[in-house]
Amino acid sequence: MTDTSSQAKATFRVGSNIAFIKYWGVADPELNIPLNNSISMTLADAVTVTTVAWDREGQLAQDEIVLDGQRLGPETAQRLVRHLDRIRALAGFQHRARVVSRNNFPMAAGIASSASGFAALTVAACAAAGLRLDASRLSALARRGSGSASRSLFGGFVEWEQGADDATSVAHPLFPPEHWPLLDVVAVVSRAHKAVSSAGGHTLATTSPLLEGRLAHVHNWLVEVREAIATRDLARLGPIIELDALAMHGVMMTSSPSLLYWEPATLALLHAVRRWRRQEGLPVYFTIDAGPNVHLICEPESLGPLRERLAAMPEVQEVLVSGPGPGPQELDEHLF
């Protein structure tokens, strides 16, 4: 139901998330239903801020979308416009939208910018339209734009259920942000946009001969990760998230065409993390999304030693640090 008395502009800040158990590949491309459940941590300090205003006066001939200071052309904006179309259909109007969105981290480089981006677009556009949807409905709607966006609708530690339709393929919180002050330390080795987007890569997953092997093990990994988070046991969580990340990239590398997101610096970091753990006893573990940048998972007491080691690596261009953060937050200040 649309509340026509509400404001026609809204701004939200939404955290990205890092998946501990990934999803890669879709069972239903139209609804964006994944092949398996996934578990993630919503990030406090890797965020997207998005303002959406619906043009109720009919001044816009088409949607106007500005992302990180650049106005998107029709082709680049196509995926975002399709998502706005979904919200227009729910709201029962045809108004065009003005959208301004900013990220405080590199886009399309394996830091889940589509997660926070589509989650922020969803909540801001719905709020501006006067659509009063609960968190599960918003999660399902965000999933249609980007699967991982379904998880950014909640703070802390989150699980996205595979489900089979819009009612069941939704995320839900496992534990709040304050449950465990775990850190995601992102070692940025490249800010370049990846040649093949995650959305494009998902469609190739079924061409890999390794996909069934990964899916056969995911259920047990999910159980382990849930229990490791519940007991705040990094030594139990770490090996599983490394294994799942490598399994997902194995699927990517063996799809047709093959996807190779890693750079030489990516591999250098993987070797370094294992060396630090084995030889120096530094409790840090890696995971990698669809990109070259490496997420290093550790607890707060390891941050100082980890920063020192990363500073000594010429391959690392920048280090981003975030703990678990809240769900979407509405802001009073708009971007336009």
Image: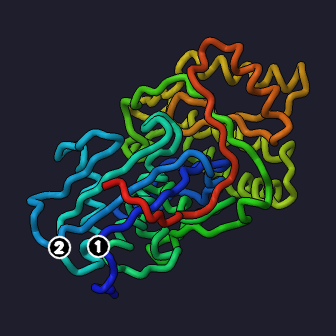
Q: Position of residue 61 (x, y in %)?
A: 9, 59
Instruction: Tell me the residue that label 1 is attached to.
Output: 8
Instruction: Tell me the residue that label 2 is attached to.
Output: 56
Number of labelled discs? 2
Q: Position of residue 260 (x, y in %)?
A: 48, 26
Q: Nearer the viewer, residue 44 or 168?
A: 44
Determine the residue positioned at 86% across, 38% down: 301
Q: Position of residue 41 (x, y in %)?
A: 65, 53
Q: Is residue 196 visible?
A: yes
User: Label 2 neighbourhood size at 10 Å, few (<14), some (14-19), many (20+)?
Assistant: some
Dot label at residue 181:
none
Q: Secondary structure at mark 2?
A: loop
How is the structure coloured here?
Answer: rainbow
Determine the residue positioned at 65% across, 17% down: 268
Asked whether the residues under the numbered discs 1 and 2 touch, taking CB atoms below 8 Å apart as contact, a structural biologist would say: yes
Residue 220 left/right relative to 5: right
Q: Nearer the viewer, residue 253 or 106?
A: 106
Q: Nearer the viewer, residue 265 or 24?
A: 265
Q: Is residue 2 visible?
A: no
Q: Quadrant of the N terminus?
A: bottom left
